[in-house]
């Protein structure tokens, strides 16, 4: 636990941001989930457990597809996918949108680079305490980095989309430096 706290503090110092505005903090167990997802307009079932078997997972919640901030964030994640893959990480976005909407969003805004999952009843968002305080019908813009053992190693909540990619990449690099064989 001290190592995780140190890692979170170190990442926060490097990034110049506070750690974990989300209620699920560093060291918490990430709630398992499966959800209908789309990548490149093709529907499949995303399983967190299966993704974690391959390496760390960046799970990010966003309010709604095709809105300005969510489009910027999706473009940023798509542009950085080579960096995430080099770190052995899977990226999954989650919103309240329907799978039909996400089929279009996964192609246009995610550029068929990573999947987005449908959470129309916000069940997953609630489990991760990622509900927008101003409007409970939407997920908040919250990013989690989850280690392969299911432990949350980084969280970041900010409605501005511009630091989510940089922050999660920095957190992954910091985690990877402590776990080079994973």
Image (cartoon, rainbow, N blue to C red):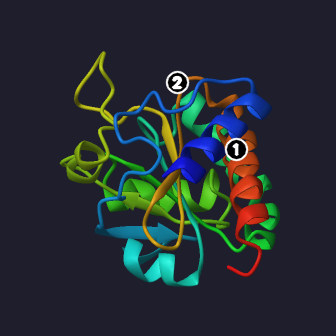
In the image: residue 133, left or right of residue 62? left
* 150 or 54, nearer to the observer: 150
Quarter that holds the C terminus: bottom right
At 58% from the left edge and 68% from the top edge, which residue is drawn? Answer: 56
Asked if residue 52 shows in the view, the reply is yes
Disc on res. 11: none
Dot 2 or dot 1, earlier in sequence = 2
* 125 or 118, nearer to the observer: 125
At 43% from the left edge and 67% from the top edge, which residue is drawn? Answer: 150
Q: Which residue is mark 1?
A: 165
- Determine whether the residue tagged by mark 1 lies in a helix, strand or loop: helix
Q: Residue 22's spot in the image, x, y percent?
A: 40, 33
* 174 or 168, nearer to the observer: 174
In the image: residue 7, left or right of residue 119? right
Q: Which residue is mark 2?
A: 159
The vertical placement of 179 against 134, above or below, is below
At 18% from the left edge and 48% from the top edge, which residue is drawn? Answer: 121
Tell whether label 1 touches label 2 (CB within 8 Å): no
At 45% from the left edge and 61% from the top edge, which residue is drawn? Answer: 151
């Amino acid at each position: 636990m001290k190592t995780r706290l140190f890692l979170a503090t170190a990442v926060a110092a490097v990034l110049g941001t506070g750690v974990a505005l989300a209620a699920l903090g560093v060291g918490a167990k990430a709630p398992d989930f499966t959800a209908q997802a789309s990548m490149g307009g093709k529907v499949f079932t995303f399983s967190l457990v299966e993704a974690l078997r391959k390496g760390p997972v960046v799970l990010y919640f966003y309010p709604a597809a095709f809105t300005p901030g969510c489009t910027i964030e999706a473009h940023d994640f798509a542009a950085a996918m080579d960096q995430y893959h080099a770190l052995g990480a899977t990226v999954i976005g989650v919103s309240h949108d329907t799978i039909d909407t996400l089929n279009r969003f996964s192609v246009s805004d995610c550029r068929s680079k990573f999947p987005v999952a449908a959470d129309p009843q916000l069940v997953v968002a609630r489990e991760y305490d990622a509900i927008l305080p101003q409007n409970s019908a939407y997920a908040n813009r919250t990013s989690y980095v989850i280690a392969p053992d299911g432990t949350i190693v980084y969280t970041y909540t900010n409605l501005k989309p511009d630091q989510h990619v940089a922050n999660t990449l920095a957190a992954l690099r910091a985690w990877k430096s402590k776990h080079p064989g994973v």
